[in-house]
Amino acid sequence: MEYRLSDETIGQVAKLVQLAILTGTDVVDNLRMMKITPSEENPGTLDPTSEYLEVFDASLKKLQDDIANMNE
């Protein structure tokens, strides 16, 4: 079976590229952490897992909080 990346997955890849640029980290490391699964809503596409998105959002929030604390 062939799969395509869902719009949500493509958007997540874009966020990972932006994060790598802003933090000076290697985008490959960020991409390796991404977890995707076949979509239940759109057969033939791959979506980020909900667990991955929760961890990513929490990490991004922590990064934002750390930046805010450094600026105080």
Image (spheres, rainbow, N blue to C red):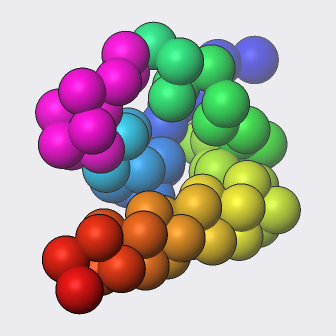
Majority secondary structure of the magenta segment?
Answer: helix
Q: Quadrant of the N terminus?
A: top right
**Left or right of residue 23: residue 66:** right
Expressed as whole percent of the image width and height from the top left, the position of residue 67 reads 30, 69
Residue 6 vs residue 51, the one in the foreground: 51
Per the rendered image, the range of residues in magenta is 18-27
Q: Is residue 69 left or right of residue 39?
A: left
Q: Is residue 48 above or below residue 64?
A: above
Residue at position x 29%, y 80% in the image: 68
Residue 43 at what x, y percent from top left?
Answer: 69, 50
**Residue at 71%, 40% in the rendered image:** 36
Nearest to the observer: residue 35 or residue 54: 54
Residue 59 visible: yes
Compared to 3, does 47 lie above or below? below
Which quarter of the picture shows residue 69? bottom left
Whether residue 43 is visible, yes or no, is no
**Residue 48: percent from the left, percent from the top?**
64, 51
Quadrant of the snapshot with the C terminus: bottom left
Which residue sits furthest bottom? 72
Q: Quadrant of residue 8?
A: bottom left
Q: Residue at x 60, y 42 (%)?
A: 45
Q: Is residue 2 above or below residue 52?
A: above
